[in-house]
Amino acid sequence: MLETPLPKSIATVCLSGSLPDKMEAAASAGFQGVEIFEQDLLTHDGPPEGIRAMAEDLGLAITIFQPFRDFEAMPEPQRRRNMDRAERKFDVMQALGTDLVLVCSNVQPAAMDDPARAAADLREMAERAAARGLRVGYEALAWGRHVNRWRQAWDIVRRADHRALGLILDSFHTLSLGDTLDGLAGEVPGDRIAFVQLADAPRLSMDVLSWSRHFRDFPGQGELPIAEFAREVLRAGYRGPLSLEVFNDEFRAAPARRIARDGHRSLIWLDSVLAGPSVPASPLPAPPVLGGVEFLEFAVDEAKGRELGGFLSNLGFRLAGQHRSKSVELWRQGGVNLVLNSEPDSAAAGHFELHGASVCATALRVDDATRALSRAEALLCSTWRERLGEGERPIPAVRAPDGTLIYLVEPGAEGRSIWESDFHLLPGAAEAPGALERVDHVAHALAQGQMEGFVLFHRAVFGLEPAPPMDLPDPQGLVQSRAMADPSGRVRMPLNVSESRQTATGRFVSAIAGAGVHHVAFSTPDAAAFVAGRAAPMLTIPGNYYEDLAARFGLDDRLLADLERGHLLYDRDARGGEFVHAYTVSFEDRFFFEVVERRAGYADYGAANAGVRMAAQARARPWLPAPRD
Ligand SMILES: O=C(O)c1ccc(O)c(O)c1
Ligand SMILES: [Mg+2]
C-alpha cells in the first residue's frame, strides 16, 4: 500500500521559454521535480551550478538529465568515444546536482544488433557512473534501431546486471506500438525501474517518430490507455517520480505557466483514477453526479438584451422572471432556463466588455456543490463567488479555461429553487408552455491549441468523457471536433477547433475574441412540430441534401417532404436510433440555437450533417469574401 502519491515531475521540453522560465513555471504549477532536457541546458547562458541553485530556490528536484543518445552497441572507435562523452555528461550532472541520466536506445545505422554488446557497454557506463555516485537508466525508443520494446531494454539491463543501471519506461514508446506492460510486475522488480515518463497522444496513423515529436499530450488529453500503464508500473512496485515528457508543437508555443498547470492537473487526476487496492484513496473528492444544465447565462447590455429577448421569443421562450436585485432576466421554455444578464459591474459585465453578447456562464446541476468545488480547487482551478443581495442563494462557480463561469447548482434544500429565492417570477411563468425539454448540448468553439486543455478540464473536474476526435468539413476549412459527455448523457459538450479563421468555428473565435459557446441545442419530443409552430428564422437547407438522404436511408416520401419543408436534418445510427434536428440562423454571427429530437437512444450529434449546416451558414453570410492566395 502506498502512503502518498508518487512525486510529480515534468520535462523542460514540455514547456516554452528559456530554461529558467520553464523551471519557474514548473514550480509555480506545484511540481516537485523537473527533467532537464539537454537542449535546454545547452542553450542556457550560464553554468549548470546556477541551474542547480535555481532548482533549490524553487524547491524543485532535478529528477533526471536527458537524453544521452546513440550510446550502446557501437563499433570502435565510437565505443571508446562514447565512454568519454559519458564522463563529460557525468561532470554536468554533478554540477546540476542530479544522479540519474537517461540513455535512449541507439538509432544509428552503425549500431550493432547485439544485446550482449549493448549490455556490456551499459554495464561499463554504469560502473563509471557508480564511481561518482551516479546512476544510468535505459529507455527503448519506439524507433530505436534494434531496441524498441521495453522487454528488449529490460533484457539488456538484466544482462548488464549492475546496481547503478535500471530500466526507464515511457508510456508513449510502449503504447504507440500497441504494446502493454503486461508481465512487467513479476518480471521486473520495482527497484530496477529507474524512472517512469508519461505521455498520452491522439491516435494518428503516421510514423511513430513524427507522432512522438509533435503530437504527444498530457495524460487524459489523448486516447492512449495511460491509466492502465501507470497501474502496471505501480503494481511492479515502482516508487519513483511520475514525470511528464511531452513533445507538442502547440504546448511549446503556449504560455509555460498554463501548460505546466495543465500538466500538474493531469497527474492529480491520474492519481484519482489510479486509486485502488495498491494505491491510497486519492485525496481528490469524487466527481459530481451531474443532473443536466440548469441554466445558461448570456452577457448582454440593455440594447443587446432586448434584441436577444426578441430572438428568443420567436423561438417560443417567454420572459419568466426578473432578478430581485440585479438587471437580470429569466427567459424560459419548458425545462430550459436562459438568463440574460446586463447588470453593470458584475462578472457578466466584464465578460460583455471583452467579448460582446455571448454565453458567460453555464450552470450545472450537481449532487453536492461543496464537494464539486473542492475537487475543482484540488485540480488547480480558480473559483468564483458573485456578490449577493439580501436573502439570495449563493451559487459557487468554477472558472472554465475560456474564462466563463460554471455555476454549481444543488437541488434546493427546502424545495426552494434558485429561481424562487432570487427572482420575482412572473405569474404563470413556472408553467411556461413549450415543447422544449432540456438543454441537450452546449457546443464550444475553441482557438487553435485550446482543445487539450478543455478536454482535460472537463474530464478531470466534472468527469465528462471525451469521444474520439473527428473532422467536420466546413466550406472554408476543416473543423476538428471532440464531443464530451457525462456517463448519463445529461451533460453533453461538443468542442470544435479549426486552423482556418474562415470556418464557422474560426469566425466565431474571432467574432467573440476568444473561445466560447458557439451553439446551444434544446431537446424536443417533436422537432417538426416545434419548427412549424415558431416564428424563428431557421437556417435553410438545400434540396440536394434531401435527395441524398433519400438515397442513403431509403426514407419514405412523406417523411422526406416533412423534413424538407421544415429545413430539418436527419441522421440514423447503426442501432436504428434516429436524430432529427434544425438550426436557427445565428444571432449576429455569434451563436445560434439548435432543436434536436432523439429517437430510440440516438446518442450522437448528427456529425454527418455538420458540413451541410456549415455550408448553409457560410451562404447566409455572402458579404464574407472567400479566402484568396
Ligand atoms: O524523441 C526523442 O529523441 C526522445 C528523447 C528522449 C526521450 O525520453 C524520449 O522519449 C524521446
Ligand atoms: Mg522518454
Image (cartoon, helix red, strand yellow):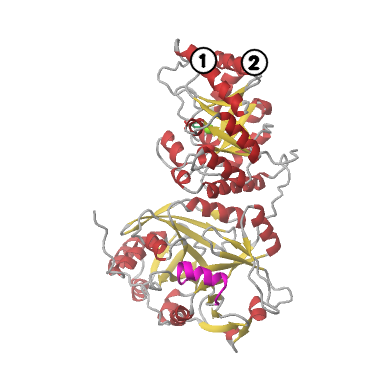
| Disc 1 residue: CB within 8 Å of ligand 1 | no
Q: In which quadrant will I find the N terminus?
A: top right
Above or below for 255 versus 330 = above
View extreme (left): residue = 629
Q: Which mark is residue 131?
A: 2
Which residues fall within the magenta stretch?
A: 343-359
Kindly state the secondary structure of the residue where label 1 is placed: helix
Image quadrant where residue 415 sits: bottom right
Query: Marks 1 and 2: in contact by CB < 8 Å?
Result: no
Report the side of 520 relative to 196 (left or right). left
Residue located 34% across and 76% down the image:
565
User: Which residue is more in the foreground, 443 or 486?
Assistant: 443
Which sits in the foreground, 201 or 625?
625
Q: Is residue 350 magenta?
A: yes
Residue type at mark 1: give it.
Asp
From this view, report whether residue 570 is shown above or below residue 249. below
Give the residue displayed 50% in from the left and 18% down from the top. Answer: 85
Asked whether, in this view, residue 216 is left or right of residue 278, the answer is left
Please name whichever residue, 616 or 385, is drawn nearer the observer in this view of the structure: 385
Residue type, numbered disc 2: Ala
Label 2 sits on a secondary structure element that is loop
Residue 572 in the image, given as x and y percentages of width and height: 43, 62
Indicate the quadrant where residue 578 lies: bottom left
Indicate which disc residue 84 carries.
1
Left or right of 503, for residue 469: right
